[in-house]
Amino acid sequence: MLNKIGSKLTYNILTVLGLTGLISAAAGVHMISGLLLNEMFTMVRMDLNTAHAVYSQSLQDVERTVRLTSERFFIGRSPDDLLTRAQEAELSRIRKAEDLDILALLSKDGRVLDRSAGRGPTAESRLEAPLFRSVILDPRVLSSTIMISHQDLERCDKELSTRATIPLIASPQTQATALRAIDSGLMLASVAPVRDASGRLQGYLFGGRLLSRDAALVDKIMRMLYKGLQRRGRDVGVVTLFQGDVRIATTLQNASGQRAVGTRGTAEALGMAPTKDSPQVERAYALGTWYITAHETIPDFEGRPLGSLFVGVLESHYTDKHRQVILIFLTVVACGMAAALLVGYWLSRLIVKPLRALTETARRLAAGDLAARARLHPGDEFGDLGAAFDGMAQNIQRNELQVKRDVERHIADSERLAMVGQLAAGIAHEINNPLGGVLVYSHLLLDDTPEDDPRRPNLKKIAQETARCRDIVRSLLDFARQGELQVEDADLHALIAQSLELARTQKSFRNIRIVKRFADSIPPIRLDRGKIQQVLLNVIFNAAEAMESEEGTIAVSTRQVQGQAAVQIRIRDTGCGMPSEVLKRVFEPFFTTKEVGKGVGLGLSVSYGIVERHSGRLRIRSRPGRGTVVSILLPVR
């Protein structure tokens, strides 16, 4: 049984720790996965913010170059000087130094007056982009991303129109289209008015950087964000400029290792129209690979969407990091669970050890070894339990010894009573007949003796004392005889009430108040009515004699004993009580504290025997000056 308790305790502790560890691990994995995913999304958003800043800075660089050139290069020069070869060469030098694709002078109505690229004759053609029309209507420095048409590119530089022409390449999971190529392009453009020394408008300076096939911008963003980080020979990050859904500049490479310019983005990735303030972060499929991407719309100066700026990270890079973090976390959890399981096992053994000691001690006590003790170390609950257990064992041992002494004394008393009974029976039988003869002849002599005969008082005294001896002999015979009980169902309350009524007729009860406290629902009891009434009267008369010549109270109560099939009768008086030395001998035959002639000391002895024969108990408690309580316990059968 102990092994089962120990095994169950160990199993339950280990099960609770194991389940707690598993639940914690599952919750931790879920939480870590969510945190890592949120961290990845946040990182991609931050990458997009960085890419936006680089993109915006490139546009500001174009604007700064155009504005400063328009102010410093032409200030104080006449319009005729605008077409000189020296000025044309200077513009070409500035264009190359500032890494611009276009730096051209426009007339006041938007016609190209000079090509800084230096190829072919100067053509007076009007540019049709909305940016130029807006500046002509309101001369000012204006910069924006623009969609420049193929015709405008040809008017500025035919090589740029060729560069902007991008054939479309079929891409997986993209929408079907009838287009085979795009020939317009996105450009970072800036236009600034050109004025003479007096501030009169002379024309406009137009500068721009064509984004189509421009690897420099996306590579710059790529280096800044991912610093050449790769996974299995492939760049972890990707930066792309979309014109519509077509990649016009990208770091993404196709299967042959070439930049995937001309491929198209998926409909899911380009279905939203995010802005800088609300970038779209999602999983995106690009040329057979999944990325976690963020993108925002590239608008023109009037807010019309022209394309998108995309940044992304390989999803497999996230899964690698996720797998690594989860593996580390699970390793830590496993180590923690192993340590917890070991501690749990040790604790279960620590708990079982005192239980084993208590169980072994209980077995020894049950086997009769009353000197067995657990002797657990104090200081905790088990120590307190062990101390209480040892105290209980000590009390059991003490009570056992006391019970043994009581039983031995009871046996000795019973043997003594039996011997006295046998002796009394023998004496009674031997002297009963002679006493009867003496009593008869004494009465005959009294009958024959005149009233005035001086011998008559002596004869009367002989007759009285002989009668008293006869009563003593009868008491001895009643004490010695163990006749059959005449048991029947009896109403205990009615029997007590009848006995009290008989007692009230005695002169000694004149100053005594009798109080009855009977319990409700006392069942009928099988008993010998005459014998129990004899016991009741004996106890009641003894109580009255204890209060002789004094006012007092005799209280008689009954109750059904809880947990036992028994009824208790308690008779309590307010008499003088008894000292302990007298109380120890009250059931001894012929022991009495009454005056000579008022008792022979057999009443309580006979009553004790009657109650014992009913399988009951008769107990007396008394203290000098505090009265006496007699308790009679009778079984309900």
Image (cartoon, grey):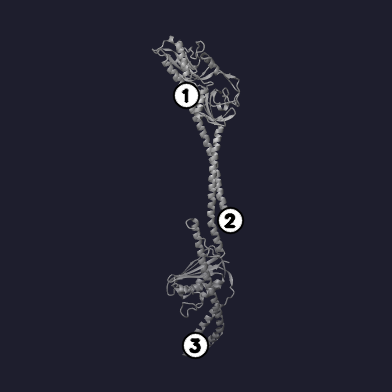
Query: CB under 8 Å between callouts 1 and 3?
Result: no
- Please name the residue shown 51% across and 34% down the image: 39
- Classify mark 2: residues with Cα within 10 Å, few (<14), some (14-19) or many (20+): few
Q: Is residue 240 above or below residue 571?
A: above
Query: CB under 8 Å between callouts 1 and 2?
Result: no
Residue 277 in view in this figure:
no
Q: Kindly indicate the quadrant of the structure image that contains residue 364.
A: bottom right
User: Residue 486's x, y, as percent?
Assistant: 59, 72
Tell which of 261 and 383 is nearer to you: 261
Tell which of 403 and 281 is nearer to you: 281
What separation in Å lies between label 1 and label 3 (alpha carbons)? 154 Å
Q: Nearer the viewer, mark 2 or mark 3?
A: 2
Q: Nearer the viewer, mark 1 or mark 3?
A: 1
Disc 3 marks which residue? 459
- Residue type beneath disc 2: Asn
Q: Is residue 402 above or below residue 162?
A: below
Q: Is residue 88 above or below residue 618?
A: above
What separation in Å lies between label 2 and label 3 (alpha carbons)? 89 Å
- Classify mark 3: residues with Cα within 10 Å, few (<14), some (14-19) or many (20+): some
- Residue type beneath disc 3: Leu
Disc 1 marks which residue? 56
Q: Is residue 19 left or right of residue 138?
A: right
Query: CB under 8 Å between callouts 2 and 3?
Result: no
- Residue type beneath disc 1: Ser
User: Residue 58's x, y, as percent?
Assistant: 47, 23
Dot 1: element: helix
Q: Which quarter of the image is occupied by the N terminus?
A: bottom right
Residue 415 in view in this figure:
yes
What separation in Å lies between label 1 and label 2 (alpha carbons)? 77 Å
Whichever of callouts 2 and 3 sits on the residue coming sooner in the sequence is 2
Dot 2: element: helix
Disc 2 marks which residue? 3
